[in-house]
Image: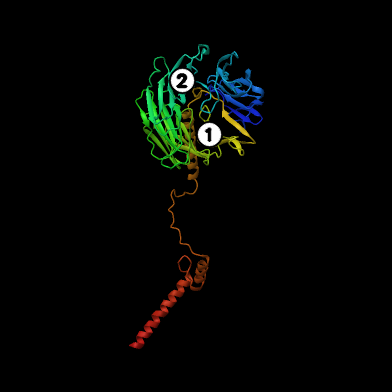
């Protein structure tokens, strides 16, 4: 589509980050859109409108991601973490507290540079940062507090806490995607009572009772995965101990809950073992799971948990749907060899395969046509690099680095790009045309049997036996193929004649 935006790639090395023009490349090489900028960390907003760069001395620069010009700079002492809100409206920062109860989590308005909100938080972990979570369209924001979820109005943080959901013992939560109509909460098991996952409505009057609930024992942590459309929630429940002693890494189960409570239960997986990865398609109407002891199984389910497609078994632990939901990459990264299989889910056929060893990160381009993998530090100290593959698995580009810390696409809405089905159709037509032209050209050549009959393999004969056969053929006139030469045939006839004559003479003497 002519109106489609161009693809861009952010690349961060030890010295800083650059922005490249994405594929298709001229002469097979990318061009620089932004020269190197020194920084220690970078991140795009979810919608791709803003880019944040953390620099030295507590400086955080915010760039307009389209023009790549700096629009705001903040200087925050002792800052250790920073995050952009999904639409790039706010910057959230965490500072090491210097005194107890110091308000060290801050929400800054990027347009004005003003402080919109602040509160105290003792420390942060991967699970507890960002402290305030926004839904994708920034219509709702909330944070986890002791025994409750607190909600704010993102258009006016000065209102303070606008509503609360009281959940004793709550340890984790996840807002639904779009619309931000519901929130999922996790309460770990305690004093003999089971752990639970509950879904609450976010609107006023919907927060007193959960609309769906699922309880379970043997549960130490959970991973939430909401679908697009906010109708269903997948929950990977992890236990640190596997009571069957089959796995050193504990036990995982996959549960599925709908917001109206009509479905609450386990997803029916046909193989024992861990759940390695689960991903909703971008339509929100089906999800893929890779699970089981190696070789792992891959199954695609509809939103009623009915299997739609079995992809088979292999050394896999990673799933990536392309943004159009048409192609699924099934891969084995991390401690696996890096095998990748690309599947056209609509037509239920494999488009191609390839390998991307040592990949740490992997993601589809916003248009769904390219797949980028990167081997990055600090996870890997050697063989850092990035590879780009076409949607059918053919490698398009490769570049190695001394140290690569980050390689990712600039986010764009998939709706701004054409449907990949047009591309798949045109490529298939091209392949078909190539096949026909090859067939016509080969017709002029010598005809070849399409399926030659396989000959029965000959029994092994050691070299000395072959030599003995050759000597025998020379002496006795018997060829190695078991057929007689002309001389051998003559000699045989002579011998037979002589035998007959001798026999006749003997019978005459007896008479």
Place of residue 311 in the rendered image (x, y in percent of width and height, measured from the top left): 42, 38
From what the image shows, is residue 4 above or below residue 299?
above
Q: Tell me how the rendering is colored.
A: rainbow
Q: Quadrant of the C terminus?
A: bottom left
Front residue (pair 135, 310): 135
Q: Residue 199 or 385: which is nearer the viewer?
A: 199
Residue 477 location, x and y as percent?
48, 71
Q: Is residue 160 visible?
A: yes
Judging by the rendered image, the residue that carries numbered circle 1 is 390
In x, y percent, where is residue 213? 38, 26
Across and down, in percent, residue 230 comes to 42, 23
Determine whether label 2 and label 1 are within 8 Å by CB.
no
Neighbours of disc 1 within 10 Å: few (<14), some (14-19), many (20+): some
Judge by depth and name the residue closer to the eye, 199 or 104: 104
Residue 394 vertical position relative to residue 281 in the rendered view, above or below? below
Q: Secondary structure at mark 1?
A: strand
Residue 23 seen in render = no
Residue at position x 49%, y 70% from top?
Answer: 473
**Mark 2 vs 1, N-terminal side:** 2
Query: Disc count in the image?
Result: 2
- Look at the numbered disc 2 and give the secondary structure of its residue: strand
Q: Residue at x 49, y 64 (%)?
A: 461
Q: Which residue is mark 2?
A: 149
Mark 2 vs mark 1, CA separation in Å? 43 Å
Q: Image quarter for residue 376?
A: top right
Instruction: Please state which of the two labelled residues, at mark 2 or mark 1, is closer to the viewer.
Output: 2
Relative depth, front residue between 255 and 329: 255
| Residue 54: image tag | none
For label 2, count other residues whose C-alpha is less than 10 Å away and answer few (under 14), some (14-19) or many (20+).
many
Q: Is residue 90 above or below residue 281?
A: above
- Residue 198 vs residue 5: left or right? left
> At 36% across and 32% down in the image, what residue appears?
306
């Amino acid at each position: 589509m002519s109106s489609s935006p161009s693809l861009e790639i952010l690349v961060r090395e030890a010295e800083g980050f650059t922005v490249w023009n994405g594929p298709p490349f001229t002469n097979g090489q990318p061009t620089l859109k932004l020269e190197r900028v020194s920084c220690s960390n970078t991140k795009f907003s979810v919608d791709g409108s803003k880019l944040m760069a953390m620099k030295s001395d507590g400086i955080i620069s915010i760039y307009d991601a389209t023009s790549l010009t700096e629009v705001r700079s903040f200087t925050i002492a002792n800052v250790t973490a920073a995050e952009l809100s999904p639409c790039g409206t706010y910057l959230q920062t965490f500072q090491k507290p210097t005194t107890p109860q110091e308000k060290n989590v801050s929400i800054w308005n990027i347009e004005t540079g003003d402080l919109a909100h602040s509160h105290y938080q003792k420390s942060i972990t991967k699970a507890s940062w960002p402290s305030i979570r926004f839904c994708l369209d920034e219509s709702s924001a909330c944070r986890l507090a002791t025994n409750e979820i607190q909600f704010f109005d993102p258009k006016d943080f000065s209102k303070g806490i606008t509503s609360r959901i009281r959940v004793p013992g709550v340890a984790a939560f996840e807002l639904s995607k779009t619309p931000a109509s519901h929130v999922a909460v996790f309460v770990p098991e305690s004093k003999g009572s089971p752990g639970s996952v509950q879904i609450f409505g976010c609107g006023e009057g919907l927060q007193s009772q959960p609309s769906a609930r699922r309880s379970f024992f043997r549960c130490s942590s959970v991973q939430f995965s909401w679908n697009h459309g906010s109708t269903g929630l997948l929950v990977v429940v992890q236990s640190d101990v596997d009571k069957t002693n089959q796995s050193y890494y504990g036990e995982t189960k996959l549960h599925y809950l709908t917001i109206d409570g009509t479905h609450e239960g386990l997803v029916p997986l046909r193989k024992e073992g861990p759940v390695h990865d689960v991903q909703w398609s971008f339509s929100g109407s089906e999800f893929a799971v890779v699970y089981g002891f190696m070789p792992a199984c891959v199954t695609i389910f509809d939103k009623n948990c009915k299997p739609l497609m079995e992809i088979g078994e292999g050394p896999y632990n990673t799933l990536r749907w392309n943004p159009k939901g048409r192609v699924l990459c099934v891969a084995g990264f991390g401690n696996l060899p890096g095998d990748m299989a690309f599947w056209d889910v609509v037509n239920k056929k494999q488009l191609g395969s390839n390998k991307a060893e040592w990949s740490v990160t992997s993601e589809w381009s916003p248009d769904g046509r390219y797949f980028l993998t990167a081997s990055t530090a600090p996870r890997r100290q050697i063989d850092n690099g990035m590879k780009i593959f076409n949607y059918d698995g053919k490698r398009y580009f490769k570049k190695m680095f001394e140290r690569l810390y980050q390689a990712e696409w600039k986010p764009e809405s998939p709706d701004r790009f054409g449907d990949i089905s047009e591309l798949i159709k045109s490529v298939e037509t091209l392949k078909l045309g190539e096949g026909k032209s090859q067939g016509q050209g080969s017709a002029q050549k010598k005809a070849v049997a399409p399926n030659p009959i396989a000959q029965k393999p000959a029994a092994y004969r050691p070299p000395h036996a072959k030599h003995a056969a050759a000597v025998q053929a020379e002496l006795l006139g018997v060829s190695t193929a078991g057929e007689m030469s002309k001389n051998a045939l003559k000699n045989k006839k002579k011998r037979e004649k002589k035998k007959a004559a001798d026999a006749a003479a003997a019978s005459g003497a007896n008479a």
